[in-house]
Image (cartoon, rainbow, N blue to C red):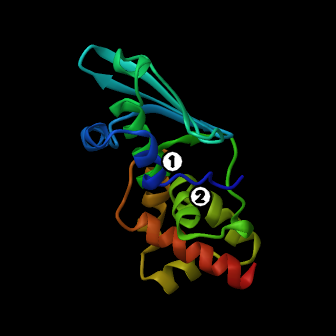
Amino acid sequence: MQLIKLTEEQLKNICSGINLQRAENYVGKFHNCSVDGSLIKGTIKGNHGDYEVSLDLASDPIGYTCSCENSRELFCKHAAALGLTYIYTPWVFASKTRLDRKKLQSTNEIQFFVKTTPLKDLLDELKKANIGLSTISELTGISMQQISVMVKEDTTGKHHSLTDPLKMSCLFLLEKYA
């Protein structure tokens, strides 16, 4: 799976300037986000309850649905906010499929891969390539105990500030030696 490209320019072409500006207040506040093929979905708390929002990125112009009143007449701020959330933080969208590490082509795809791939999976893959935790600890300057804590936190959804750099180090080692 490769990420479907969405740009702010595409959103500007179908959304009013005022709604796009209002959308910025909702970016990153979605929950139950998912991506399935070209369809992205999310739920946002609005003025009158939760709104279910979806965008079809394969259609031209972008197809959308939102359970708010305004969406019946125009591309609403919630739909724009879902698009902006996908642009800025695509990893919050749970995906049924994973990006193939060997086919990563852009920095956005690398960032998505790092944010959605468990640290444990990368460490297990390195172990298969005979690169153990002690070697990783030595190379990164992160203690084995701290790496173990980071693996545990990563599986529970907590995020340590060194987790992403450690994942990037793992990616480098995998590309170089596996």
Is there any visible trace of residue 87 in the rendered image?
Answer: yes
Q: In this view, does 124 lie above or below 92?
A: below
Location of mark 2 (residue):
120
Query: Identity of the amino acid at label 2?
Result: Lys
Is there any visible trace of residue 133 in the rendered image?
Answer: no
Residue at x 33% of width, y 43% of height: 27
Query: Identity of the amino acid at label 1?
Result: Thr
- Nearer the N terminus, badge 2 or badge 1? 2
Mark 2–mark 1 contact, CB under 8 Å? yes
Q: Examine the image and state in which quarter residue 131 appears.
A: bottom right
Q: In which quarter of the image is the C terminus?
A: bottom right
Q: Nearer the viewer, residue 60 or 115?
A: 60
Q: What crowding class fits label 1: few (fewer than 14 Cα within 10 Å), some (14-19), or many (20 or more)? A: few
Distance (Cα) linking label 2 and label 1: 8 Å
Percent of width and height locating residue 63: 56, 32
Percent of width and height locating residue 15: 39, 39
The numbered disc on residue 93 is none
Tell me the element at label 2.
Answer: helix
Percent of width and height locating residue 24: 28, 44
Location of mark 1 (residue):
155
Q: Is residue 112 above or below residue 29?
A: below
Tell me the element at label 1.
Answer: helix
Percent of width and height locating residue 115: 50, 56
Give the number of marks.
Answer: 2
Q: What crowding class fits label 2: few (fewer than 14 Cα within 10 Å), some (14-19), or many (20 or more)? A: some
Q: Examine the image and state in which quarter residue 150 appears.
A: bottom left
Residue at x 30% of width, y 14% of height: 49
Q: Which of 9 and 156 is in front in this view?
A: 9
Q: Which of 126 and 143 is in front in this view?
A: 126
